[in-house]
Amino acid sequence: MTLYGYWRSSSTWRVRIGLALKGLDYTNEPVNLLHSAQLGDEHRARNPMGQVPALADGDVVLTQSLPILEYLEERYPQVPLLPGSYAQRAKIRAMAEVVNSGIQPLQNLAVLKHLDTHSVDRGDWSRHWIDTGLRALESMATGSGPFLVTDGPTLAEACLIPQLYNARRFKMDVAAYPRLAVCEAACLALPAFQQSHPDQQPDAVV
Ligand SMILES: N[C@@H](CCC(=O)N[C@@H](CS)C(=O)NCC(=O)O)C(=O)O
């Protein structure tokens, strides 16, 4: 498999977490967002939205991080990203969706660039939407241990942990969400989250 992504992209990190949890090998092909490589013809042929990530599995090219993770779940069921009962799996998906549709699209690069043309402060805007979503997740986190829903990391953590990393880039205090901070510490102690961390990627600039 080949993952087309960017080291600091939260959506790309979601997919790296899924691949790492399932122990799947892949080649990393950086798409430099700062050079607008995501908007070039070569990458748009993979993802017409002009966004990362895209994942090629043989001849199949997949886009959108959550459908990519659902594909991995069905194709490579080892180490499930959607474990537990029907109700738990619905909860995992709901928490992933808070990040995927309730936070990240409101503060992705294209939106922030457009805000610049309306004299809106990128930081204030982004912190507002990140805080709204993280508060919701804090109250939804009902797992008995450190994880959000079940006794290990799932699709929900694959979305949450990159979003918390992103929150820090906007100078937010993650300790303001104590349940989420505990979950983050538990995840970051795991090799799958460590090896998939943005700072560990070959295209990282740290
Ligand atoms: N819903 C998409 C979101 C993808 C997305 O917004 N990716 C960002 C990086 S995290 C991106 O490529 N931004 C480039 C841009 O906005 O120009 C997914 O989950 O894959």
Image (tube, helix red, strand yellow):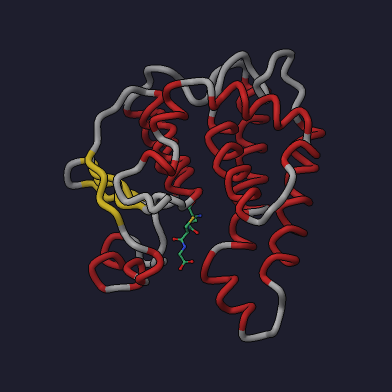
Residue 187: image x %, image y %?
Answer: 56, 25
Is residue 153 shown left or right of residue 71?
Answer: right
Relative height, residue 123 to residue 64 (above, below): below
Q: Residue at x 37, y 28 (%)?
A: 20
- As drawn, which residue projects farthest toward the left? 59
Total numbered badges shown on the rendered structure: 0
Up/down of 29 relative to 68, above or below: below
**Residue 184 appears left or right of 36:** right
Instruction: Residue at 39% x, 53% y: name it.
Output: 205
The image quadrant of residue 124 is bottom right
- Identify the residue at the far front of this view: 206
| As drawn, 187 above or below 131 | above
Name the spot of residue 36 as percent of width and height, x first: 37, 71
- 148 lies left or right of 15: right
**Residue 188, quarter of picture:** top right
| 123 or 9, nearer to the observer | 123
The quadrant of the image that shows the N terminus is top left
Residue drawn at (48%, 49%) of the image: 11
Task: Place residue 45 in its image quadrant.
Answer: bottom left
In the rendered image, residue 156, in percent from the top left (x then y), is placed at 59, 33
Residue 120 locus on image (x, y percent): 71, 78
